[in-house]
Amino acid sequence: MRFLLSLTFIFIISLNIFSQACVDCGLKGGFGITNLVNGNVWNESKIDPLISTGHTYGGKLGLNFNLNYQITVDFLTKSSNQKYLFQPSQNNPKREKKIQYNSFDIPLLFRHNSDNGSFMEVGPQISILMGISETTENNSIENRKDYFEATNLGAVFGFGSFIMGNDNT
């Protein structure tokens, strides 16, 4: 009897969850402040991290279970920057250094779309390093890809609202 009740309950829920299943795709993009995290740099009094910016763009492919719940896979190209102001010694003037980090990111996200057009998404991400360069004031550019991991795992938490339209229906 317990088995039949459980089976009936699962059957009813599954009909409701997949009643409006569909696939969608879209474009994504972003611009904001970036920061490379390194405890050795942050604890060094001779180095001052400066505000830096970066951008990302790409697309998403989503499987909608209904109007509010979705699983998406994104394919994003990202460029992050970090500028530092440092003074090698007291006799030398301060110098600026810029590090540019380029990667290809693939997050797998669970997404909740609210009825007013806003959304929240969370999930794991794999990042593949495409390139990293270091530029100093005398414009010497060095490839630093060998000093970083080729792939990284991370977590993503995002939120926002649709640009066009104001509801989810």
Image: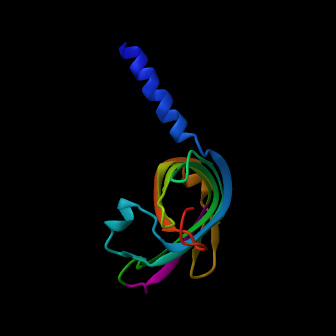
Q: Quadrant of residue 129?
A: bottom right
Is residue 20 placed above or below 145 in the rendered structure? above
Residue positioned 43% across, 28% down in the render: 9
Q: Quadrant of residue 140?
A: bottom right
The C terminus, quarter of image: bottom right
Q: Position of residue 165 (x, y in %)?
A: 59, 72
- Tell me, yes or no, if residue 58 can be seen here: yes
The magenta segment: 91-102
Q: Residue lying at the far top in this picture: please name it.
A: 1
Q: Position of residue 146 (x, y in %)?
A: 60, 52
Residue positioned 57% across, 40% down in the render: 18
Out of 14 and 136, give the one closest to the viewer.
14
Is residue 33 placed above or below 76 in the rendered structure? below
Residue positioned 58% across, 73% down in the render: 163
Query: What's the magenta bit mostly, secondary-structure-wise?
Result: strand
Q: Position of residue 121 (x, y in %)?
A: 48, 55
- Tell me, yes or no, if residue 131 can be seen here: no
Q: Position of residue 72 (x, y in %)?
A: 59, 50
Out of 83 and 61, give the one closest to the viewer.
61
Q: Is residue 160 magenta?
A: no
The N terminus, quarter of image: top left
Out of 126 and 15, give the one closest to the viewer.
15
Q: Is residue 33 left or right of residue 163?
A: left
